[in-house]
Image: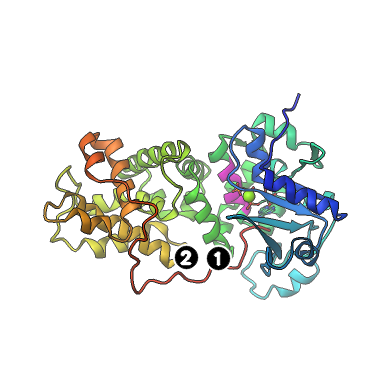
Amino acid sequence: MRKNLVVAEAIYDIVKNLQDNGFVAYVVGGAIRDLMLERKPKDYDLSTSATPEEIRAVFGRRRARIIGKRFRLVHVRCGQEIIEISTFRRNPDSTGQSAKKRQNKLVPENMIFSDNDFGTAEEDAWRRDFSVNALFYDPVNDDLIDYTGCGIDDMNAGVVRIIGEAELRFEEDPVRILRALKLVGQYGFSLEEKTGETVRKLGHLILHSSESRLALEMEKILKNPYCDAILTAFHDYGFLTYCLPYLETNWNSPARTYLMQLLAERKNRILQERYRDSISLAMAVIALPFVEAEIGFGQHGKLWERDYNAGFTIGHIIQEVFQPHNMIKRLTMSAKDILNLQPDFFDSDKELAELLHAHGYAHARELLMLQNAVVWQDKSLIGKWPKPMTNKKRHRHPQRKRPPRRSTPSKK
Ligand code: ATP
Ligand code: MG
């Protein structure tokens, strides 16, 4: 028998609020998977019969903001958190609006450009990507609904099955290829036969996806604690060559083995809540072994010769490793800072106070700890470099302003 799925109180309240106002509302997406697998959901996605304007009317303009163009949804503020609520959609008609918008002949014929046709809960389930992503849960009535009829079985068997005709669905939106493999890595699932065959065949289509959507999905993968297993799934299904070609080229190198060890250690520390799931830190972790391979392997106490033009090499390697992705400049700069600071931990002329206030110290220290856990295992290093004070205002780089948040949501 299925165990009760216990959602966070704030989520229960939002669903109840929508239901009390006469709308149908469910928890959907990753949180359902995590709850069924007894993992802690990282966030919640909600879906409802209310339109974006109706959702905003229920929660008020101060708490609710309509965002997105390609996929309009509402961000509802809940204390410190933002909860995403989308309106039930149906699959857009391929002869309709999205087909008319298509101008570039090189773009695959079935690609979808707009997804704002509202529908019923059942229609909404069928337009989702995989059966395990099409489960709807009503926490108020403890009701788990499996419209596709195989979501629960696939969850139990650990199978990722595309909904509908595989080639069509991956052509409609090639980002689904990456999303399928993310589930393989993140949960140890396997791809259903036809889904797997199609992923292998159509991996190249990812190069036709919108740059901003792809970059957002990449950011989610880098944030994911299971990033190491996800990259391995990409490699196993021949997808890494399109998604991160530099890593694929260097798959059999010692640098790749080392980066997997560092990522595994990062995963442990995130899952034990010893450190946060920073994207820029993940970028620095992935680039570090290649920087070392280029500059010369650092030894404990003598990391990267200072007179070398390391800053330039670091920037260049980060760019190489993550191409063809258009990573946000702020993340790239931060990854660069994290790597640039590494030699300073071994520079006897550096004042502790100076380093403690350096931009990126916390992540740089964490990268040092990851290396220490994997390579040096030197306990004295842990005490030597203290954790930064969390309540202290740290120095920000004067020229570096946060760019405005991207408004394009990652999902369809
Ligand atoms: P995560 O844990 O990474 O958030 P998720 O499955 O919740 O995983 P989201 O991007 O938050 O991913 O999307 C929420 C849900 O929206 C998915 O579970 C899926 O049902 C649907 N969805 C997202 N992207 C697509 C897509 N490209 N095609 C079809 N359905 C999608
Ligand atoms: Mg989600």
Crowd rating for badge 2 (residues with CA inside 10 Å; few <14, some 14–19, many 20+) = some
Asked if one can make out residue 192 in the rendered structure from this viewpoint, the answer is no
Name the residue located 51 percent from the left edge and 55 percent from the top edge. 218
Distance from mark 1 CB to nearest ligand 1 atom below 8 Å: no
Q: Position of residue 384 (x, y in %)?
A: 21, 43
| Span shown in magenta | 176-183
Specify whether 294 is left or right of 137: left
Q: Which residue is mark 1?
A: 212
What label sits on residue 326 in the rendered view?
Answer: 2
Q: Is residue 182 magenta?
A: yes
Distance from mark 2 CB to nearest ligand 1 atom below 8 Å: no
Among the 4 quarters of the image, the one containing residue 94: bottom right
Q: Which is more toward the observer, 20 or 323? A: 20
Specify whether 100 is left or right of 251: right
Crowd rating for badge 1 (residues with CA inside 10 Å; few <14, some 14–19, many 20+) = some
Magenta stretch secondary structure, dominant: helix
> How far apart are the two marked residues, 1 and 2, measured between alpha carbons?
7 Å
Name the residue located 19 percent from the left edge and 47 percent from the top edge. 298
Q: Which is more toward the observer, 42 or 294? A: 42
Of labels 1 and 2, earlier in sequence is 1
Q: Identity of the amino acid at label 1?
A: Ser
Name the residue located 38 percent from the left edge and 38 percent from the top edge. 265
Q: Position of residue 260 (x, y in %)?
A: 38, 40
